[in-house]
Image: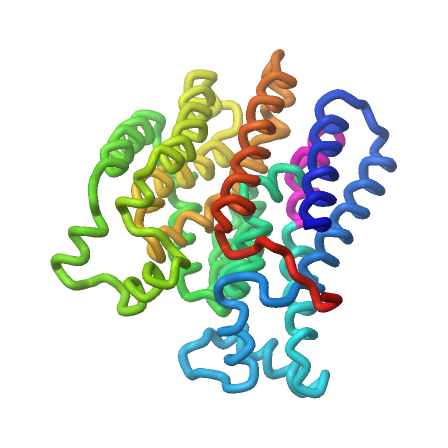
Amino acid sequence: MFIFFLIYSILFLLLIIGIHFRVSKVDTLNIFLSVALLFTFFASIRWGIGADYFDYREWFYFPPDYVEVGYSIISEIVYKLFDANYQMLIIVTSVLTNFIFFESCWKYSNKQTALLVIYFYITIGSYFFYLNGIRQGIAIAILFFGFRFIKDKKLLMYILTCFVAYLFHAAALFAIITYFVCEKITKKKMIVLYLLSLCFIFVDIEGILAKINILPPAYQLYIDAGVVESFHENTSSISFLKLFIPNLFFIYLLSRDYYQKAKSEFTFYFLYIFFYNTVSMIPIINRIMYFFEPSLLTLLPYIYQYEPNYKLIFWCLGIYYFIFSIVTIIILKTHQCYPFTTIFG
């Protein structure tokens, strides 16, 4: 409980400082690095955190054939170098993932928004998602790093980035579409696709997939174990609240012409909203949307630049995601990160 109290206290301070204080670039960097190191430390000392924690531990000692080669190589190296110490794998993957994420957070921010980018990285759920899904967490971090190649229109470098992410999670290859959508999509097509995505919120795709018998074999086991929710549980009032604010924010950005102001970043966020609306209600399959979840972080500098009322926007988003994080992580125990247990007991 103490660690979560500390986490949310730090986050609230970051929100206040990020919105209301003008901090020098040197001081911003010092705070940024201190918080990054602290959250990396928390991830490194965790024990039993995440629905898949003990599965990963079993894979560490008895590697299955179906685990991606990148993760398998890191696991094998750690196994040999550190005398089969599983906690060292947790430390190595925590440092790797958070280093890539925090470097990218700094890259896509500026002096005014760097602390807010950390705040939203934690509260939107990307940090806690990694604590549960190590392989996909690494892949998401790598793809987030690769967004710079979309901005710089370096197709081969972005494809290479997707391939490296694929070495840790096969579904990462799907993210290749991001480059082409950012390059080709028009505002009109974006609006049409967005309106289409809204229809999926009320479609019981899970039931359809079950009837044609193409759900993943482990799907019902995950539901029975309480690791994921069924469609009918996902369509509760809480889940609709999760959908409401991001959609409202997307509509606001669309009305403010962020398609022109920050096309790559806005299109990246559009893809997140599109998959949020279409597959977030489908457990296991909904992991696709997590590849696009950090997109919000890339938009923060532009909101600061273009919005006269940026403080109000940051406060509204900040409070929403603060509550969202507490409800999902602590109350609903999403990703099974609460209570936070460590190697120190």
* Vertical placement of residue 265 versus 283, above or below: above
Point out residue 48 in the picture as x, y percentages from the top left corner.
Answer: 59, 67
**Who is closer to the viewer here, 56 or 271?**
56
Q: Residue at x 52, y 23 (%)?
A: 261
**Residue 238 sits in quarter:** top left
Q: x%, y% of residue 108?
A: 64, 39
Magenta stretch contains residue 242: no
Which region shows up in magenta? 102-117
Q: Is residue 161 visible?
A: no
Q: Is residue 265 left or right of residue 4?
A: left
Report the magenta stretch's main SS. Answer: helix
How many numbered circles does the render carry? Answer: 0
Q: Residue at x 66, y 85 (%)?
A: 84
Residue 106 in the magenta stretch? The answer is yes
* Foreground pick, 8 / 283: 8
Looking at the image, residue 80 lies above or below residue 181: below
Up-down relation of residue 72 to residue 104 (above or below)? below
Task: Give left or right: position of 134 versus 22.
Answer: left
